[in-house]
Amino acid sequence: MMDFDYVVAPMLIVIGAAIVVFLVMRRLQSLRAKRTAPARQLFQRVTLIAIAAITLLAAGSSGINAVLLQLDRRELPGSIHMVHGRKMRINCIGQGSPTVVLEAGGGNDGLNWGGVQPVLARTTRICSYDRAGYGGSDAAPPPRDADHIAEDLHELLHAAGVQFPVVLMGHSIGGLFIRDYASHYPTEVAGLIFEDSSSPAQFRNPVWLAYNRSRTGIDFENILNRIVFILGVPRLLGECSKSGPPGFGSAAATYYSQDRCHEPFATMSSESDYDLSANETLSDVPFGSTPILIFSHDSAAQDPDNHMPDLERASDQMAEDLKKLSTRSRRIIAKKSGHFVHFDRMDLIDKEVPSFIRQIRGNAPSPEWGTTVEE
């Protein structure tokens, strides 16, 4: 499936710009033969030249951005495998078992884990990957719900020769996707790690429903944002060359910053039927004694101007309820962390995930299951 925003749209803009410039040139030539007032003729010439200049700038920016994005995609680390006739990228580093598979949140690809993946790879094998339509993976037709995403990951892991069982770690909506995977392929999962994960109950909770309704007016803003990215404006503003988040190595920071100029709007839209994904995971049976580690954000660290106590209480309860999925689960509230714990508290991830892996291996004493602590 061809990328409309970053391949088709730029081509159409370039073609459209060529037509506009051609028509402007013809109009300028016709003005020479007309006997009009000098001031009016000057105004028309200036207007036509301005239209041509703006059109050429838009075509040049969009076209150059499209070409550079294609080059950026070729440089991504990892390997490509065919899944249902589509290319998917996976990047596995380190040695040891169980392998930890990282599932990014909504709107993010595997590059989002560039800070923690190299550190965690000192303990065991770590794989990040791009869901369909993100990073180096081809887009797939909708719906991109939890069932389809879990099936894609299942096929990708087998195609890449990943050793089972694995530990799945999901951030945000990625928590729903790994939960779906564990329900469909329980023998392939040795443990689950939820990082500020979404919950299927979130899409039934009255507080969350009211919050989502209050955000329905941002559709026009999203359309404008999409046009800005298609035109390559972020690249003009230097967004593609900014340093990555703290803790990212030079190579990971470069990939991450280049990724800032490639917002996959179509894919994000196709994944946005969260109600469908919630239905597919709401009926999940508990996972017995499968080890589960839960990271949650710190409500005290939220922006006071945007703090919504009711929403925070609902989120805290849903995070606490995740512990009911297994008899061996524990929750950690990451102090001073927002939604991206692997950015804000990379130190905590780098400490607790290896410890969790050693517990699964039987090389470390089991923690006190069922607890919730702040770290």
Image (cartoon, grey):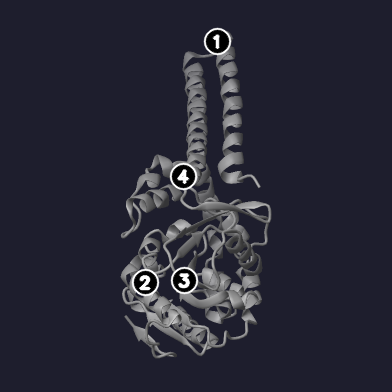
Mark toward the start of the polypeptide (3 vs 2): 3
Nearest the eye: 197 or 218: 197
Q: Local crowd at mark 3 within 10 Å, few (<14), some, or many (≥20)? A: some
Query: Vertically, is 144 above or below 321?
Result: above
Q: Position of residue 115 (x, y in %)?
A: 37, 60
Q: Which residue is mark 1?
A: 32
Q: Residue at x 46, y 45 (%)?
A: 75
Quadrant holding the C terminus? bottom left
Q: CA–CA distance between discs 2 and 1?
A: 70 Å
Mark toward the start of the polypeptide (4 vs 1): 1
Q: Which residue is mark 3?
A: 97
> Which numbered mark, 3 or 4, is in the foreground of this view?
3
Q: Residue at x 61, y 59 (%)?
A: 159
Q: Local crowd at mark 4 within 10 Å, few (<14), some, or many (≥20)? A: few
SS category of the residue bearing label 3: loop
Q: Amino acid at mark 3?
A: Ser
> Which numbered mark, 4 or 1, is in the foreground of this view?
4
Q: CA–CA distance between discs 4 and 1?
A: 51 Å
Q: Amino acid at mark 4?
A: Glu
Q: CA–CA distance between discs 4 and 2?
A: 27 Å
For residue 75, the mark is 4
Taking the image as shown, residue 114 lies to the left or right of residue 146, namely: left
Q: Amino acid at mark 1?
A: Arg
Nearest the eye: 123 or 148: 123
> Which numbered mark, 3 or 1, is in the foreground of this view?
3
SS category of the residue bearing label 4: helix
Q: Position of residue 12 (x, y in %)?
A: 61, 35
> Which numbered mark, 3 or 2, is in the foreground of this view?
3
